[in-house]
Image (tube, helix red, strand yellow):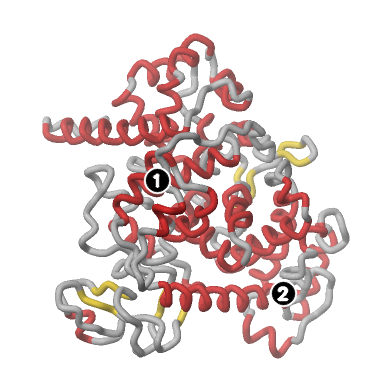
Amino acid sequence: MSIDGEEKPWMCGAGAVNLRRVGSIVRDIGEPCLQHSPTKGKKMLKPGRWHATFDSDGKIIGFNKILKLIILGGVDPSIRAEVWEFLLGCYSIGSTAEYRWQLRMARRERYNDLLKKCQMMHSSVGTGRLAYAVGSKIMDAKNLECQRISCDKIGIPYDGEMTITDAHGSCDAISDEGRVADWLWTLHRIVVDVVRTDSHLEFYGDTKNIARMSDILAVYAWVDPATGYCQGMSDLLSPFVILYEDNADAFWCFEMLLRRMRQNFHMEGPTGVMKQLEALGRILELTDFEMFTHLSVIGAESLLFAFRMLLVLFRRELSFNEALSMWEMMWAADFDEAASRELADNCLDPLILRLPQDAATCTTDGNNKQHSKNSPTAHSNAEEPVCGVDALRPISMIPFCGFKPSNFWTRNHHWQTNTLAFSPLRNGDDDLAVFCVAAILILNRPKIIKQACSMDDVIKMFNDKKLEINVKRCVRLGMRLRKKYFYKLMKQSSNGNTEV
């Protein structure tokens, strides 16, 4: 990304990555697509159908039909906030309304605790003033460096205005002054990006909403220091800030999304996006050799023009509404039990919650026996328990981090959109977003082959919005390409040829 026209290296976590070619591609990431062409059609999930899905206890019945509607046309904006929490895995499909309310309250309390910790280190966090700090002495790089040196000398945390917090109370909660200093520097980069994110939207004409985005990113950067803040995260967070009035709700949805994408923002070794680009090459070679060959001939075989699409999930190639429709359609298409297991293992330790004693029960399929998570029978039983399915009963307090493999999807939910389980933590070969990029290239094959003579030409086509991107066609073709790709892989394997 460039600041005031000057190209800067990509910053991520505690380090910097100087990707010149990538930098030229994502340099204008702060300039959103202003086209407004929302997804149209009768096939979509509408409020009446959604509300009819719940029984008297608030459990969802027949979620597979809901998924089909979402894949066909997305979600009506009036119910998007509710539906997304299920698509992202914030709530179990088998959970009751009472259980979800208690979990929401616990998550809000946990977020507020984290926010208070951040406030101890920087007084502007959580006050609505953090976003005003651009260019002021609070976030001035030289002042921050001076504060960092002072902090190292006296060994206690500080806020951005050099208001030293209580040493005894703070040092117990924050033991790593170097981590605090890195986090404070991260705030500067957060604010610089946030003020430019979706600035064309009326919603962000209110500076309080800009500050909300800053606060959530600040909390996340503290919770996940290995990732910190990276350029592009504000683009992923923005829709959640708009959809959810409570910052805690927006934070948890954003965190659930990053569980799927965190590797994209880790710059030590090959990033998730770079692995996805490698997968994209393999996909094109097997499914559209003509496109693969042309890109190789013109020197675009690295496919770096797709870096931005994969990093921020088409936020720069689509209008705001189109991007949201594409997100939910892809989430619905990849909604399966295998994903929940891997995502649960990818949880951040600081986000582990403890629910009240009456907040959850675990019901084993088939015999309806209840066990707490720490109960020996819960672990020894051959069937994994499905928590939060039946009426709430008092049990011992249990760790709960967003969701567990045992309670995300019911075991009798078998409907899937493809024959292979989705795994968000693999090498990108089965990530639907990658196949959607391939679909965009294939749908625009004639124009690309005729007009693109170099990598720069392809980049310009995307930046100038010269390529047609229809969300529904893109997702549907992406799903078909995925089936075709894995069919050819299996065929190659059966023939004894494992090389792509």
Q: Nearer the viewer, residue 302 or 284?
A: 284
**Quarter of the image containing the N terminus?**
top right
Asked if the residue under mark 2 is in contact with the one under mark 1, i.e. CB atoms within 8 Å, the reply is: no
Query: Horizontally, is 365 left or right of 13 in the view?
Result: left
Q: Pointer 2: what residue?
A: 119
Q: Regarding mark 1 in the picture, which secondary structure is present there?
A: helix
Query: Horizontally, is 206 left or right of 400 in the view?
Result: right
**Which residue is at 44% across, 43% downward?**
74
Query: Horizontally, is 379 left or right of 203 in the view?
Result: left
- Please say whether residue 428 is visible from this viewpoint: yes
Q: Find residue 416 and report its horizontal and vertical position in percent.
A: 26, 48
Q: Which circle's residue, 1 or 2, is located before the other in the chain? A: 1
Q: Nearer the viewer, residue 481 or 2?
A: 481
The amino acid at mark 1 is: Ile
Query: Horizontally, is 461 left or right of 370 in the view?
Result: right
Q: Pointer 1: what residue?
A: 70
Identify the image quadrant of residue 70. Answer: top left
Question: Crowding near pointer 1: few (<14 within 10 Å), some, many (20+)?
Answer: many
